[in-house]
Image: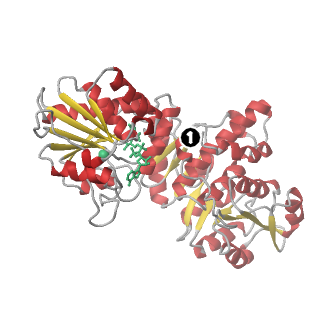
Amino acid sequence: MIPTDRMAAVDANAAALGVPRKQLMESSGNAVAREVRAVADPGATVALVCGRGNNGGDALVAARFLTEYAVRVHLLGRPETIRTDIARENWAALENAAVPRETVTDSRDLDLNAPDGDDPDVVVDAMLGSGISGGLREPERTAAAAINASDATVIAVDVPSGIDADTGDPTGGPGGVAVDADRVVTFHDETPGLAALDAAVTVADIGIPAAAERYTGPGDLLGLDRDPDSHKGDNGEVLVVGGGPYTGAPTLSALAALRAGADLARVACPESIADAVQGFSPNLIVRPLPGDRVGSSHADRVASLAAENDVVVLGPGLGDGDGTREFVREFLTAYEGRAVVDADALRVVPEADTDADLICTPHQGELVGMGGETAPEPDERAELVREFAADLGHVLLVKGAVDVVADADGVRLNRTGNPGMTVGGTGDVLAGTVGALAAVADPFRAAAVGAYVVGRAGDAAADANGAGLVATDLPDRLPEAMRNE
Ligand SMILES: NC(=O)C1=CN([C@@H]2O[C@H](COP(=O)(O)OP(=O)(O)OC[C@H]3O[C@@H](n4cnc5c(N)ncnc54)[C@H](O)[C@@H]3O)[C@@H](O)[C@H]2O)[C@H](O)CC1
Ligand SMILES: [K+]
């Protein structure tokens, strides 16, 4: 089962892997034609009712594959108003091949009957698919009623038009108009709503590479765009808790959080380094904690700071001094929000009794220190990490040449990045980036997208600086790395 928005991401990842949408449409259309052949003998009449998006495009392709049938294509609207290039190209191909077709500008004129006046044997509903929003509007609304009035076997492409593929409910609300399909041919994987329908569902493999789902790609960035009406704070407030023996680590995390889109980044660090952290950038808000190490006496203060933020990034530069582990344990016991846990804070997680939602970002050595197992081969490592994530009840992002992101339910691998990123501080950039993303996306997605974009920023930094790249090269490259094109 794959929700519609995830399908759009996988689709874009497939395009980045060299399998563009038009190629997928060709396979989808072929699958629709196969479904027609399964229910009707050659010579039968087939009416294809096509919308102007890619759902319609699938049926325009199918028409080309159904040469042994009496096919008639009904396009709802003028060809110039077809919404995508690939659907328009497939309309042009039908035109060039003189496949029987008509354009319907007023759906009250839609006549599904064969030229002899008989009902068609099969009607293909390709009006609307995953691009639908709200209840069916005209001309699709009246056309849906015409399809439902026919005695033909109705095959819906992807999802019956007017049905929400994720819920199975009418998009127009209870009682909303929708096509009543006998069969549905859907692509790649079934969306959750189709199981609720009284229709036979065929899932067709359309040649999307498995890697488009398993590996991160540009499609994973879809839907992260900022709401144009958002206000300060809506895009995330991140608290970095760290520093003491190190100054740069919490600073890098906080700067990365800002570049990854957070509205505010606060740093809670020992007062001994507060001026130094502030000195790096006026964009940071520094909250000094008495002394030169973070310890358990700070747990209450940090808890109240955490309550003002959407996400906490715990660990960068914290060190493993006396009292630091106790601090982390006490903080996690009381905290119930989202946190990214990195560096020396990681080893406390397995023994912590916490209701927080954690994203742990160990490298393989730290993973083993937490009690997890690793393996050289990425797929084997992925399974081990998934099992350990399930035991912990948290998301794991295990850094490596191939990063593994896992929770109890799934795994995503990331292969952006380069050997130059083994330099100190890149992990702090990653933790801050994931922190910012966790304010606007679920923890698993935040981890997967964070790994992807930091690797991309690192690749851009390596282009400029080769093996001499340093962690401070990365944050400024994040905005470009997060652009979804
Ligand atoms: N995802 C994939 O990998 C593949 C999907 N295929 C097929 O493409 C459709 C989705 O296509 P898309 O162009 O995004 O959307 P639609 O065709 O569903 O709709 C487009 C169009 O419709 C208008 N619209 C929206 N809501 C309404 C409404 N309530 N009433 C009337 N009109 C509406 C709006 O203007 C949209 O622009 C997917 O389902 C698959 O069939 C590929 O071919 C294979 C790969
Ligand atoms: K449809």
Q: Position of residue 418 (x, y in %)?
A: 67, 34
Q: Is residue 205 visible?
A: no
Q: Is residue 231 above or below residue 222?
A: below
Name which residue lies at 54% across and 52% down: 223
Q: Position of residue 336 (x, y in %)?
A: 56, 72
Q: Label 1 CB, ligand 1: below 8 Å?
A: no
Q: Residue furthest top?
A: 97
Name which residue lies at 53% across and 46% down: 220
The quarter of the picture where the C terminus appears is top right
Given residues 392 and 335, the one toward you in this image is 335
Q: Is residue 417 visible?
A: yes
Kindly indicate the quadrant of the structure image that contains residue 158. Answer: top left
> Does residue 283 appear to the left or right of 86 in the view shown?
right
Given residues 394 and 329, the one toward you in this image is 394
- Amino acid type at mark 1: Pro
Given residues 223 and 367, the one toward you in this image is 223
Q: Is residue 48 above or below residue 251?
A: above
Q: Position of residue 64 (x, y in %)?
A: 29, 25
Kindly indicate the quadrant of the structure image that contains residue 141. Answer: bottom left
Label 1: few (<14), some or many (≥20) within 10 Å?
many
Given residues 378 and 326, the one toward you in this image is 378
Name which residue lies at 53% across and 33% down: 16
> Does residue 136 appear to the left or right of 422 in the view shown?
left
> Does residue 248 appear to the left or right of 160 in the view shown?
right
* Residue that badge 1 annotates: 218
Instruction: Dividing the image into four quarters, tell me where ligand 1 lies.
Output: top left
Q: Position of residue 408 (x, y in %)?
A: 43, 55
Callout 1: SS: helix
